[in-house]
Image (cartoon, rainbow, N blue to C red):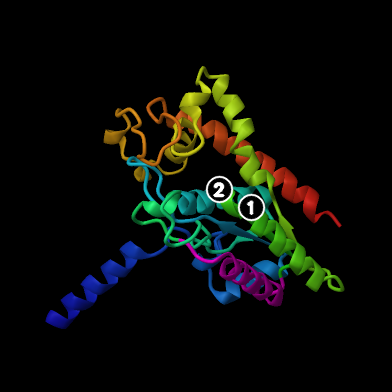
Amino acid sequence: MKLSLIALVLVSSLSLTAPAAAAGESVFIEELTWTDVRDAVAAGRTTIIVPVGGTEQGGPHMALGKHNVRAHVLAGRIAAELGNALVAPVVAYVPEGPVDATSGHMKFPGTITVPPDAFRAVLEGAARSFRRAGFRDVVLIGDHGGYQSDLAAVAARLNREWASTPVRAHFIAEYYRAGVEPYAQALRGKGLTDAQIGLHAGAADTSLMLAVDPRLVRADRLAAAPVAGDGTSGDARPSTAVLGQLGVDLIVLRSVNAIRRAVVR
């Protein structure tokens, strides 16, 4: 009797933690089996999106995993729009400057940095793995501004290495760019000032996070005015999910269009 009860509890626990998507339906390869991936590639899903995030401070009101969650969710929406793509696990460890830096993000507890050469090596190794699996187009997108040049360099190096093959790497700069000036312009159209929009953890950054996953924003801290040295650039108080959706739509649309242009042969 006790064994039966224990078995029932175990089965119930497993069912609660099972992925929401049934096998084969997800665009995220970490939710698929190897046979799912094999069959998806054989069916024409030969584009793999490698989303790059980063683990860094986002002011007192936003969780450290902001870039990782955003890159994961937006990459999934981009893949769904493309219809022929899958999404790799998010690269969460990125260069954030010297580990002993007394300025920048590294002075805030929780921020993680890795050397640029290690970061590039991880991306190159992942891309070669995807080529071996049969993918023909490896797409690099990054949610953080600090390593955009690294993504471009990795794509260029891989394309030199793969020059005699049909496989290509693509750095899609439009993913990050769309969330900067085009998004800021859209927010200005809604009455926000540049001082509110900010460059980091302000109204633009925070609104985008509210639209993607509001759990990562501490709503009870949004009413507080920014304080010098608290890790913010801008004013998060006007942030809303509705404003963030403007950025989501821009990023997805412009990224999809850029990827389609890049993979045309």
**Image position of 63 (left or right of 34):** left
> Does residue 1 appear in this view?
no
Q: Quadrant of the N terminus?
A: bottom left
Which mark's residue is nearer the viewer, 1 or 2? 1
Separation (CA) of disc 1 from disc 2: 17 Å
Q: Position of residue 14 (x, y in %)?
A: 32, 69
Q: Is residue 91 above or below residue 33?
A: above
Residue that numbered label 2 is attached to: 74
Q: Earlier in the sequence, mark 1 or mark 2?
A: 2
Q: Amino acid at mark 1?
A: Gln
Q: Secondary structure at mark 1?
A: helix
Q: Is residue 149 above or below residue 196?
A: below
Above/below status of 129 relative to 24: below
The structure residue drawn at horizontal position 53% and vertical position 73%, both measured from the top left corner, is: 33
Name the image quarter holding residue 229.
Answer: top left
What range is drawn magenta here? Answer: 113-134
Q: Position of residue 196 (x, y in %)?
A: 46, 26
> Given the current orientation, which residue lies at the most extreme left position?
2
Q: Nearer the viewer, residue 32 or 224?
A: 224
Instruction: Give percent across and percent down for residue 237.
Output: 37, 27
Q: Residue at x 65, y 70 (%)?
A: 124
Label 1: how many Cα within 10 Å (few below 14, some 14–19, many 20+): some
Mainly helix, strand or loop, the magenta region?
helix
Residue furthest top in the image: 191
Residue under numbered circle 1: 148
Asked if residue 124 is among those painted magenta in the image, a careful observer would answer yes
Quadrant the C terminus occupies? bottom right
Q: Going 46% across and 42% down the picture, which residue do you hit? A: 212
7 or 182, which lies in front?
182
Left or right, 19 with reference to 25: left
Q: Position of residue 11 (x, y in %)?
A: 28, 72
Pointer 2 local density, CA inside 10 Å: few below 14, some 14–19, many at least 20: many
